[in-house]
Image (cartoon, rainbow, N blue to C red):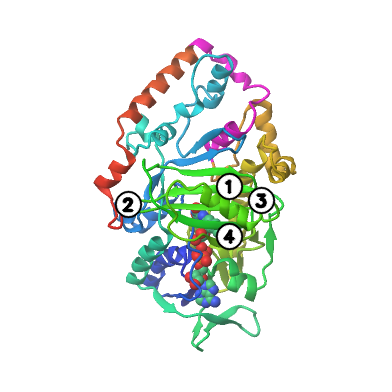
Amino acid sequence: MKRVVIVGGGTAGWMTAAVLARLTDAGISVTLVESEEIGTVGVGEATIPSLHDYNQRLGIDEDAFVRATGATFKLGIEFVDWRRIGERYLHPFGTFGRDVQGVKFHQLWARADRDGDGVGALEDYCLTAVAARQARFTRPSRDPAAVLSSLRYAFHFDAGLYAAFLRDRATGEGVTRIEGRIGTVELAPERGDIAAVVLADGRRIAGDFFVDCSGFRSLLLGEALGVPFVSWQHWLPCDRALAVPSASTTPLLPYTRATAESAGWRWRIPLQHRVGNGHVYASAFVDDQQAADALLGGLDGAALGEPRALRFTAGVRERLWERNCVAIGLAGGFLEPLESTSIHLIQSGIARLMSLFPGEAHATVERDTYNRLLGTEYRQIRDFIILHYHATARDDSPFWQHCRTMTPPDTLAEKLALWRERGRVLPEPGELFTDDSWVAVMAGQEAPPRALDPLLDALPAEEAGRFLRHLRGVIAQTAAAMPDHAAFIARHCASASRG
Ligand SMILES: Cc1cc2nc3c(=O)[nH]c(=O)nc-3n(C[C@H](O)[C@H](O)[C@H](O)COP(=O)(O)OP(=O)(O)OC[C@H]3O[C@@H](n4cnc5c(N)ncnc54)[C@H](O)[C@@H]3O)c2cc1C
């Protein structure tokens, strides 16, 4: 193993290159091929908190990263009109309250709410949600006893600036960048491994191991090695998107907004220098013109260009590692952007590739473990995203009727049954979305459960009421003491292009 070749210089390619740069210390060359003529997908601007792991791994200074990418802080996602038109809820990144004697906090809250104890909304018990509603931000406390330690955050950033930021790092650390369009992929005659990629101008780039970051086209894994694509479109029918930036508005919200439409949803992602907007929709249920009208009609600032069209199918390649090639990013799969999980899946692929880095081209044990772990993660995230579409009371359009009445995957059906029975959530061990995320979306979109946890009977309602009031007060006070999101950025990490 002497030569690693990364094909593609989008977010996936450069995130991979920045980490694989370390291999150069072990005498392995790392080369990245990208084509300006083809360009990148150019979207992918909202993240989840796991990005901290990636940044830490690379020792990235957070303020420098926020400045360089025009980033803002993201405390969660607001879902508007998902359960019913006119209803909204937050899926915050932080935790809800505190469990008591083995009873989940949301159960305690649900009992008090059911009994009319005037305990307010569930989100009042999550500092991250309260801060989001008030457009406040500060970094969490390191003291686990402080309520401020429960705050969790991610980022919204400019995808183009992010790729450039990582490219500078990776090339500074020994990654070789080659610009050019790949015309053919050369397979080794006997083994069928990838031997080289050949550019349109005839240059040949040989390698021992290849990382396919070529985007939706999946040039190596899909086209050259023929690994089939497994479509999940029957559960996730959205297959098109239109994206357009718009002028910034105030206040600078520290969260993404996802507004349900008649056949899909619109995103709103605030950056320092603009707002990213998009409309993800199902072409079987709405035409492109109607989708464009809904996007442009929903903007809250002036459009800064014409909408750009993207097409995709939700799903994943049957195997993400085949022979001497791993696909990372859109070349491997795409689950639609509703919970901003694609960049996380890129990171997860990179982290696992590094943990299982092969000593030779045919590393079957490592390959099988990689495929199992990544396959499971895709499936778990898929279920969480389907939940948003399926757990709805909307019946105002054929799209929502389809989503509401479809048969969900068995794994999701079990989770829904547990919630509907006694409001329980039990993610599988190691699942990306933890209890709090499942509670946020189930509580936001499902009807109240039939009954609650019987262990609640061990907790007297009066005492629980006092605890709830105290907690709500402390969270409100802590949020009130936090600075305004825009003021925090102006003070610590304003980008040069801001304004
Ligand atoms: C509508 C939409 C919204 C999204 N929103 C989010 C979000 O909010 N959060 C999130 O985490 N993710 C989001 N994603 C996903 C995110 O955009 C991608 O995961 C991310 O940008 C990585 O893309 P990529 O690098 O795999 O592919 P691309 O950006 O498409 O890069 C492919 C690279 O391969 C190169 N290439 C291709 N063919 C050749 C060739 N023949 N020769 C040479 N080079 C070649 C291209 O030039 C390019 O450099 C979204 C995706 C879509 C479609």
- Identify the main secondary structure in magenta: helix
On the image, numbered disc 3 is attached to which residue? 236
Identity of the amino acid at label 2?
Glu
Residue 345 coordinates in the image, percent (x, y): 53, 55
Nearer to us: label 3 or label 1: 1
Q: Is the residue at mark 2 in contact range of ligand 1, meaning its CB lies under 8 Å from it?
A: no
Identity of the amino acid at label 1?
Trp
On the image, numbered disc 2 is attached to which residue? 62
Report whether residue 416 is seen: yes
Q: Is residue 27 above or below residue 92?
A: below
Foreground residue among 219 and 271? 271
- CB atoms of marks 4 and 2 within 8 Å: no
- Outermost residue toward the bottom in this view: 202
Residue 456 coordinates in the image, percent (x, y): 58, 18
- CB atoms of marks 2 and 1 within 8 Å: no
* Secondary-structure class at tag 1: strand
On the image, numbered disc 1 is attached to which residue? 265
Q: State the extent of the magenta-drawn residues as a range.
A: 434-462
Foreground residue among 367 and 462? 462
Q: How many labels does the image show?
A: 4
Foreground residue among 425 and 268? 268
Judge from the rendering whether residue 457 lies leftward or rightward of residue 235; answer left or right.
Answer: left
